[in-house]
Amino acid sequence: MTLFLSFFGSFTVKAQDYHHKEFEWSYNGYDWTWSLDIPISLYEAYKSVPVSTRLLYQSSGYGFLTTTNDVYLEMVAEKLQEASSQEGFESYDEVSFVLAFIQSLPYTSDSVTSGYDEYPRFPLETLVDNGGDCEDTAILFATLTLIMGYGTVYINPPEHYAVGILGEEGLPGYYFTYKNKRYYYCETTGEGWKLETYPLNIKT
């Protein structure tokens, strides 16, 4: 059906342009594929934030980049939760499933992709740019898991950035204690690192 409104004016509503992205990852013996159409206007809005603002508080300011109120990222988190629920995943597998998705994104250095020595990305930028370095994937993972309701903190070993997920006592593996709570280490760069596994080559 066509509706003409020339009597009231001549402006035309334009179709939204999107970045079409394809993702592939493996978890629990199965391969997953996912297509996302990300609004270009939303991406450009994040991209316009100056580097000086992104680095205002250095690593302690990455909370500014953790955009848990982004409606599009809420949709991404919801879809990941739906897939987890359909597979019957409990919390451990749900977090590990999301972690595997993040780990599938290629590692790219800031100097190569942005021209800056340090260029922390907003989560939506990391999705569109198809990856980033350790703080980029950590920020994306932290944002998604926070939206999903998990206790999440950033972990900043020397020359690295990662995420801690709040877990009960008794889980195997490596954890950090913060305010008398256990946060299990999540490595977001490189594939195959499961929840609470701590890479031996990370400096402590």
Image (cartoon, helix red, strand yellow):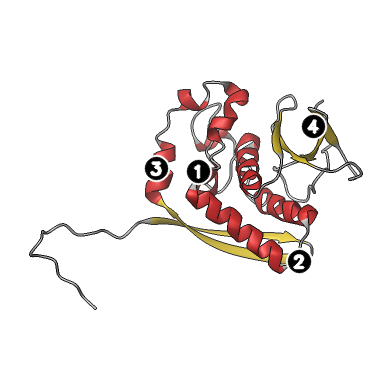
What's the residue type where badge 4 is placed? Ile
- Which x, y percent locates residue 145? 66, 46
The residue wearing badge 1 is 125
N-terminal-most mark, 3 or 1: 3
Determine the CA span between mark 1 and mark 2: 30 Å
User: Tag on residue 44?
Assistant: 3
Mark 4 nearby-residue class (10 Å; few <14, some 14–19, many ≥20): few
Give the mark nearer the N terminus: 3 vs 2.
3
Residue in view at x 24 percent, y 78 percent: 1
- Secondary structure at badge 4 equals loop
Q: Residue at x 39, y 42 (%)?
A: 44
**What is the three-letter code of the residue carrying label 1?**
Glu
Identify the image quadrant of residue 133: top right
Disc 4: which residue: 202
Single out the mark in the foreground, 2 or 4.
2
Distance, label 3 to label 2, CA atoms, is 37 Å
Q: CA distance from mark 4 to mark 3?
A: 34 Å
Badge 3: few (under 14), some or many (20 or more) residues near its Cα, within 10 Å?
few
Label 3 vs label 2, nearer the camera:
2
Q: Counting other residues with Cα less than 10 Å from the Cα at mark 2, is it few (<14), some (14-19), or many (20 or more)?
A: few
Q: Secondary structure at mark 3?
A: helix
The residue under label 3 is which amino acid type?
Answer: Glu
In percent of width and height, residue 19 lies at: 44, 55
